[in-house]
Amino acid sequence: MAERILVTGGCGLIGSSLVERILAARSTVLVLDNLSTGRRENLPNHPGVELVVGDVCDDALVGTLVRRADRVVHLA
């Protein structure tokens, strides 16, 4: 079974590169980004990517996403 990895700041330069590497490893990715500096277009158009537009300061949102993930990479 593929792991689901949460990447905060996944629409930025480093985050989007990491998302591509995670997908290549056959895992799925939850991306949390507020799009203040990152761009939606940086993410690959792939069924294994789910973008959630929000802020890491939103405790409830982060808690919900962490519960859905097997691992977390914090880049925001």
Image (cartoon, rainbow, N blue to C red):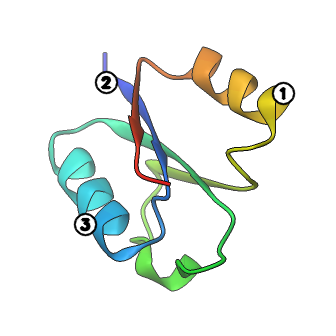
Q: Residue 60: x percent and y percent? A: 84, 27
Q: CA distance from mark 1 to mark 2?
A: 25 Å
Q: Is tag 1's residue or tag 2's residue first in the polypeptide sequence?
A: 2
Residue 50 disc label? none
Nearer to us: label 3 or label 1: 1
- Asked whether, in this view, residue 26 is left or right of residue 47, the answer is left
Residue 35: horizontal and vertical position, in percent? 65, 74
Q: Earlier in the sequence, mark 3 or mark 2?
A: 2
Whole-Å distance between the Cαs marked 3 and 1? 27 Å
Looking at the rendered structure, the kind of residue marked 3 is: Ser
Relative to 17, is 70 on the left or the right? Answer: right
The crowding category of the residue bearing disc 1, from other C-alpha atoms within 10 Å (few below 14, some 14 to 19, many at least 20), is: few
Between 44 and 55, the one nearer to me in the picture: 55
Tell whether 52 sits left or right of 42: right
The residue under label 3 is: 17
Asked if the residues shown at circle 3 and circle 1 are in contact, with their CB atoms under 8 angstroms apart, the answer is no
| Nearer to us in this view, 72 or 44 | 72
Which residue is drawn at the image coordinates 22% and 38% (left, top)?
26
* Quadrant of res 45: bottom left
Task: Please state which amino acid type lies under the numbered disc 2.
Answer: Ala
Q: Which residue is mark 2?
A: 2
Which numbered marker is on residue 60? 1
Quarter of the picture containing the N terminus is top left
